[in-house]
Image: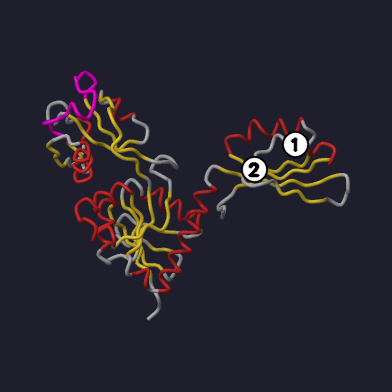
């Protein structure tokens, strides 16, 4: 039987961003609304769509060899299963991307704008609504603040003050909380997506190598996000001025040209800086300026 890797793809808000990340890493995943088993153009991988909230459990149990889920849901699993559950999961790659942006999300403690609550300690005896129940209980436990934490099935932002005194909710921008007249009083935890593996699966040399290669390519795709390559030609007499304008990932590559008085430069820059940089390079007498996209950067 051919080697196969069972890989969990997070279903829901992270699904599209994850599939896009895999595409940048070189893996094309084709998801259908009618199937929980997306196709992938790698015959050595079997994909399954699993809710991010459940991914850690299925990886820990060995139902999946590996999967992608947030640190928040890994922490939630660990809070409910102790050291045994945590030991069965091995993080392979920190992948900082989210559903709206390539960044971290925050689980925040929020209260109604007009409430008297100012600190977590003010909530002693209060009711907290959240989907992240066990991690929230652990957070208040560390603070020594007794609260009642209730599971929220959704629409958590509308529950205070009638159905709960406060909420713990995930946010990228805070716009939904502000729209519901909620005020953040603390950050419970930050989270970003991780590639995790079952500890037993990593004992298999083929699976370990396969997962290490996938992790390498995913991290390379993350590194390339928001960056572009720039190539240009410049006279040696103008080189110092041009180098002063060029930020670089490491150092710019400088290559000789057939005309000994000229050199070629190749470097990587933040895409958001291009519109300001190119006119400055032109003013510094650079020529043949070419901007090109990047899919991966292997550090």
Q: Residue at x 78, y 43 (%)?
A: 233
Residue 21, image x, y percentages: 46, 52
Q: Residue at x 20, y 56 (%)?
A: 81
Residue 299, image x, y percentages: 56, 53
Apparent side of residue 175 relative to residue 253 in the rendered image (left or right) = left
Dot 2 falls on a residue whose secondary structure is loop
Furthest toward the bottom, the residue is 1
- Mark 2: give few (<14), some (14-19) or many (20+) Cα within 10 Å: some
| Residue 105 magenta | no
Q: Which mark is residue 194?
A: none
Furthest toward the right, the residue is 260
| Residue 120 magenta | yes
Residue 224, image x, y percentages: 55, 48
Circle 1 residue: 242
- State if disc 1 and disc 2 touch (CB < 8 Å): no
- How many numbered discs? 2
Q: Nearer the viewer, residue 216 or 155?
A: 216
- Indicate which disc, 2 or 1, sits on the residue closer to the N terminus: 1
Q: Which residues are magenta?
A: 112-128
Dot 1 falls on a residue whose secondary structure is helix
- Mark 1: give few (<14), some (14-19) or many (20+) Cα within 10 Å: many
Q: Coloring scheme of the render?
A: secondary structure
Q: Quadrant of residue 65?
A: bottom left
Label 2 vs label 1: CA separation?
12 Å
Q: Quadrant of residue 6?
A: bottom left
Q: Nearer the viewer, residue 10 or 270?
A: 270
| Location of the N terminus (image quadrant) | bottom left
Q: Nearer the viewer, residue 122 or 223?
A: 122
Residue 38, image x, y percentages: 36, 61
Circle 2 residue: 248
């Amino acid at each position: 039987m051919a080697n196969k890797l069972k890989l969990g793809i997070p279903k829901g808000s992270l699904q599209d961003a994850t599939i896009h990340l895999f595409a940048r890493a070189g893996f094309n995943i084709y998801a259908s609304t009618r199937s929980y088993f997306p196709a992938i153009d790698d015959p050595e991988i079997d994909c399954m769509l699993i809710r991010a909230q459940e991914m850690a459990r299925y990886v820990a149990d060995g139902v999946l060899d590996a999967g992608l889920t947030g640190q928040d849901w890994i922490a939630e699993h660990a809070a409910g299963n102790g050291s045994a559950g945590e030991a069965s999961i091995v993080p392979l790659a920190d992948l900082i991307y989210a559903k709206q942006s390539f960044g971290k999300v925050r689980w925040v403690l929020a209260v109604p704008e007009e409430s008297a609550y100012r600190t977590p300690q003010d909530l002693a005896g209060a009711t907290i609504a959240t989907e992240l129940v066990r991690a929230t209980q652990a957070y208040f436990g560390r603070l020594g603040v007794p609260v009642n934490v209730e599971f929220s099935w959704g629409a958590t932002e509308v529950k205070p003050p009638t159905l709960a005194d406060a909420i713990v909710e995930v946010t990228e921008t805070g716009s939904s909380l502000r729209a519901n007249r909620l005020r953040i009083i603390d950050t419970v935890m930050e989270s970003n997506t991780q590639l995790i593996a079952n500890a037993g699966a990593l004992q298999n040399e083929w699976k370990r190598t396969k997962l290490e290669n996938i992790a390498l390519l995913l991290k390379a795709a993350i590194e390339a996000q928001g960056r572009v390559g720039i190539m240009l030609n410049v006279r040696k007499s103008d080189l110092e001025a041009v180098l002063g304008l060029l930020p670089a990932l490491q150092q710019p590559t400088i290559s000789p040209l057939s005309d000994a008085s000229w050199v070629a430069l190749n470097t990587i820059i933040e895409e958001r800086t291009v519109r300001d940089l190119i006119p400055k390079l032109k003013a510094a007498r650079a020529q043949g300026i070419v901007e090109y996209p990047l899919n991966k950067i292997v550090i």
